């Protein structure tokens, strides 16, 4: 993505409805290429279609959303894995996206890789200060909004919603 000096990047993303209301990292070609170093998967590989809008999520579009959310390249395998699991039929992401209740997916990651990338699973793990936790969760939410159309009043019937 290329923006000129006269464009306010934050306002641009808000105007396009590509943000959750918070600033995002602009996905330049260089930044996306750096994010893609976090996986050996092909950029054009289809991860799946994100309901209810059923927009395709490729490894590249997942990387773009991870970048926008503030992820490091080493977080990308977790974001890809999380979305892949949520796209399984038994997860019922279409129901999660379209419900009237304020719901949010919960993703639990453990083991050596979680420790390696700094995922925090102890006191305050849902609070501020843990980049891996916050940015991985935000990347998932941005994809649910941008690719899935899970926007309140558009693809989501939620009454009160949730900031998660």
Image (cartoon, rainbow, N blue to C red):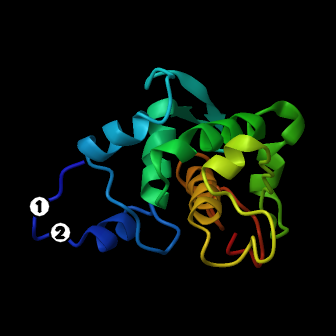
Residue of label 1? 4
Measuring from the top left, give residue 51's x and y in whole percent. Answer: 68, 42
Residue 86 occupies which quadrant of the picture? top right
For image coordinates 43% across by 57% down, the residue present is 68
For image coordinates 71% across by 60% down, the residue present is 156
Measuring from the top left, give residue 103's x and y in whole percent. Answer: 81, 65
Q: Which mark is residue 7?
A: 2
Secondary structure of the residue carrying tag 2 is: loop
Determine whether, in the image, residue 101 is placed left or right of residue 112: right
* Residue 43 showing in the rendered view: yes
Residue 26 occupies which quadrant of the picture? bottom left
Determine whether, in the image, residue 50 is placed left or right of residue 26: right
Measuring from the top left, give residue 111's x and y in whole percent. Answer: 78, 43
Secondary structure of the residue carrying tag 1 is: loop
Furthest residue to the left?
5
* Residue 51 showing in the rendered view: no
Residue 61 higher or lower than 68, as above or below: above
């Amino acid at each position: 993505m290329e923006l000129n000096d006269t464009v306010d990047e934050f306002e641009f993303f808000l105007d396009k409805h590509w943000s959750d209301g918070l600033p995002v990292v602009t996905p330049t070609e260089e930044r996306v290429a750096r994010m893609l170093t976090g996986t050996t998967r092909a950029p054009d590989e289809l991860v799946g279609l994100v309901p209810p809008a059923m927009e395709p999520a490729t490894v590249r579009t997942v990387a773009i959303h991870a970048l926008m959310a503030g992820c490091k390249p080493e977080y990308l395998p977790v974001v890809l894995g999380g979305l892949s699991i949520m796209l399984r039929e038994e997860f019922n992401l279409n129901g999660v996206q379209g419900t009237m209740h304020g719901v949010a997916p919960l993703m639990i990651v453990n083991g050596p890789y979680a420790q390696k990338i700094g995922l925090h699973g102890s006191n305050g793990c849902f609070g501020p200060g843990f980049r891996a936790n916050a940015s991985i969760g935000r990347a998932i939410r941005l994809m649910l909004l941008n690719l899935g159309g899970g926007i309140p009043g558009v693809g989501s019937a939620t009454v009160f919603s949730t900031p998660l």
